[in-house]
Amino acid sequence: SKARLFDQNTDVKVSFKDVAGLEGAKEEIQEIVDFLKTPEKYTALGGKIPKGALLVGPPGTGKTLLAKAVAGEAKVPFFSLSGSDFVEMFVGVGASRVRDLFKQAKEKSPSIIFIDEIDAIGRARGKSNFSGSNDERENTLNQLLTEMDGFGSNANVIVLAATNRADVLDKALMRAGRFDRQIYVDLPDLRERREIFEVHLRPIKKEENLDLEFLAKQTPGFSGADIANVCNEAALIAARKGNKAVGKQDFLDAVDRIIGGLEKKNKIIT
Ligand code: ATP
């Protein structure tokens, strides 16, 4: 079977109401939704619509979710790939994949291209410790820069990319006409964690008057992805006990389990 080159979703169901908190980021990215929906309105006075924006922040904070929500809100197709998919690739494959991705996105414009973990391809050139695959990575990065320069701002394709290491990116990526906007997506504060719990508790049968404020207070430093995990774990824990609804203790047990998992993960990294 043919290797999948990238993902394509022409009917994204995610909207801004699925993204809890992140008010500032949502406000900034709303502008991109407007560019996609009514480009004429913005170009009327000779201005150019931006081609790309970088979503910067720690893992699991909703960068992918936010990019999908842009496509969902603007009702445009969402093309995506992950930089980490390029790590072990044969010579020439990365660049041709990027070329195909942009070709498809232009054919289906208005559209969104989303590149997750862009640091895997976008590290500053000539600054990697790894030899061997490095040339191929540079080829891929050069193709990406070429594609972004190649399409006019009237192509109505907007490229969003996510990273938690903006500091290692090749400065060429941030030049005008490329990813010249940065949108910060931070870990949620107390209020935002509460809102994320609200979103992820929607499908869950929970006990009446479960205190979301309390849950938010138990989870400092948790990302949205961690909180989504807690909600799911809690539902599994309660179900295993044969309970009819998920209660406070199930959430506390789930929080402990997630913290245990995070500690293990950190041990492997450090
Ligand atoms: P990574 O850097 O690891 O790719 P990311 O920032 O792209 O992470 P997402 O993949 O968007 O994070 O988040 C993973 C999941 O966590 C989402 O699908 C969602 O279920 C949940 N999540 C994260 N942030 C939020 C949020 N702000 N509101 C609601 N759910 C969230």
Image (tube, rainbow, N blue to C red):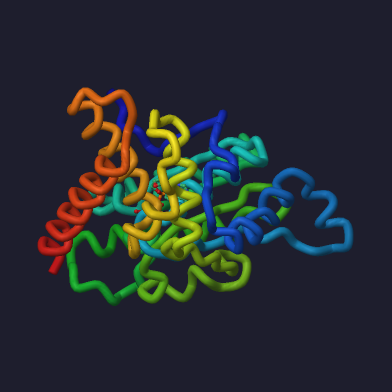
Q: The N terminus appears in which quarter of the rendering?
A: top left
**Residue at figure coordinates x 32%, y 46% from the top left:** 93
Q: Quadrant of residue 236?
A: top left
Q: Is residue 253 left or right of residue 123?
A: left
**Residue at figure coordinates x 59%, y 43% from the top left:** 17
Q: Can you give x and y, in whole percent of width and height, for residue 111 in the image?
A: 61, 41
Residue 28 seen in render: yes
**Residue at figure coordinates x 55%, y 32% from the top left:** 13
Q: Can you give x and y, in whole percent of width and height, for residue 88 in the image?
A: 22, 50
- Total marks in image: 0
Near-viewer residue (55 or 3): 55
Q: Can you give x and y, in whole percent of width and height, for residue 268 in the image?
A: 11, 61
Q: Is residue 187 left or right of residue 71?
A: left
> Is 202 drawn above or below residue 214 in the view shown?
above
Q: Residue furthest front?
A: 209
Q: Is residue 254 left or right of residue 109?
A: left
Residue 121 seen in render: no
Q: Can you give x and y, in whole percent of width and height, for residue 106 in the image?
A: 61, 41
Q: The C terminus appears in which quarter of the rendering?
A: bottom left
> Is 150 drawn above or below residue 240 in the view shown?
below
**Residue at figure coordinates x 26%, y 25% from the top left:** 243
Q: Residue furthest right?
A: 45
Near-viewer residue (253 or 6): 253
Near-viewer residue (78 or 133): 78
> Is 45 drawn above or below residue 104 in the view shown?
below
